[in-house]
Image (tube, rainbow, N blue to C red):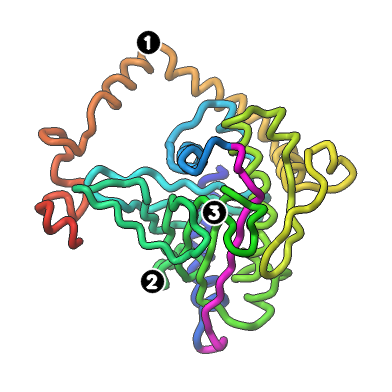
Amino acid sequence: FETTYMFSCMWLLMPWLKYYICCNPWIFDLGHRLCQQISTEMADLKGPEHVADTARYLISWSRQDRASAERIDLWSFVPHYPLPPPDRRWALGLQAGGGDYPGKFTLIVHTTHAAADVHGVTEQFVLSNSCERPIYRVMLWYNNPYHFLTGWVEASVSNGEPSQRNKRLGGEHPMWLVTGHSPLVAGRGSWTGSGMIDAFFDYWLPVFVREMREQVLGADIANAKYQEVISQDGASHPIAKKGLSSYKDSPTALGDMQKTATKQHKARSQAAGRKLARLADMHLGKMACNRLQSSDLHGAGQLLDGHSSPTHSLSEERCKLS
């Protein structure tokens, strides 16, 4: 039900929200706006390459370990940018947004993966001047009716330079958006638009950082270093208090998501999911895994050889130009 509902909201509402409200040149004086969000630091996560690899595990892998999957299932925003096939560096990605009904939806994006290598091509043009290690470029094209924003977005490991050095190896998410100047779309208190999305990532990124740290250092350290920010236009500086126990008398993004999960009876649906997941450990499940994961269907001589994308059959020289 949840997925069907979210897809239905995307098909029905996002084109209207994009072309009538968020990016309408007939009623708004449109311009460009940079919304830069940098999470709190992750300098303890074993270097920029390890930070990038951990982020890809959470965002690009089709399946995580069951405990991680159940924690991610509670998030109010879940990006999934699947790894592209071997002949190209981009793939369509899906974002699941909204914490509670009725405001739950999915979004479609065009994602280029910095780690993808096709015929030796690893080009990743980066606009941000504080990028330590690029991970994704996410294009929100104007002709894509299934995302309410229009712009160029990057997701990278940040060095925090020059103005936020206390966020070393945090996750940065700069967004160059086409937007109006009206508070309806530019205000942080609005229900949509560039201002809302800037405030939202200040809210969501601490939960993402906590999960990143749990993946590398464990839950105890992740909870002890949990830290939120003072959400505002420009640089959103970290709040002085650190650790989930320090926030026990004030609401947190993580606490909000856990309350919403309780309201939606996530424990019940996740219990059913665990039972289904056990099928992969049965004899039939292992046979299916061995068959489906034994070779790349897009490889030479395989079922989808030459049919994975418009560039698959191009020569190496042509592919570099495509």
Amino acid at the residue labelled 3? Ser
Whether residue 42 is in magenta: the answer is yes
Tag nearer the camera, 1 or 3:
3
Decide if residue 14 is in sight here: yes
In three-dimensional space, the C-alpha distance between marks 1 and 3, rounded to whole angstroms, equals 45 Å
Q: Amino acid at mark 1?
A: His
Q: Which residues are magenta?
A: 26-44
The crowd level at tag 1 (other Cα within 10 Å; few <14, some 14-19, many 20+) is few
**What residue did someone put label 2 on?**
143
- The alpha-carbon separation of the residues under discs 3 and 2 comes to 30 Å
User: What secondary structure prevails in the magenta region?
Assistant: loop
Of 26 and 225, the residue lying toward us? 225
In the picture, measured across the screen, residue 161 lies left or right of residue 280, that is right
x%, y% of residue 100?
Answer: 68, 50
Q: Is residue 260 above or below residue 268?
A: below
Label 1 or label 2, whichever comes before in sequence order:
2
Q: Please, what secondary structure does the residue beneath circle 3 have? A: strand
Spatial CA distance of label 1 from label 2 is 46 Å
Percent x, y of residue 187? 69, 74
Q: Amino acid at mark 2?
A: Asn
Confirm or deny contact between disc 1 and disc 2 (CB under 8 A): no
Q: Is residue 59 above or below residue 33?
A: above
The residue to which callout 1 is attached is 283
Which one is earlier in the sequence, the residue at label 1 or at label 3? 3
Q: What residue is shown at x 42% (from left), y 51% (from top)?
A: 93
Q: Give SS at disc 2.
A: loop
Q: Which residue is mark 3?
A: 158
Looking at the image, which is closer to me, 147 or 110? 110
Mark 1 falls on what kind of element? helix
Q: Is residue 90 left or right of residue 25?
A: left
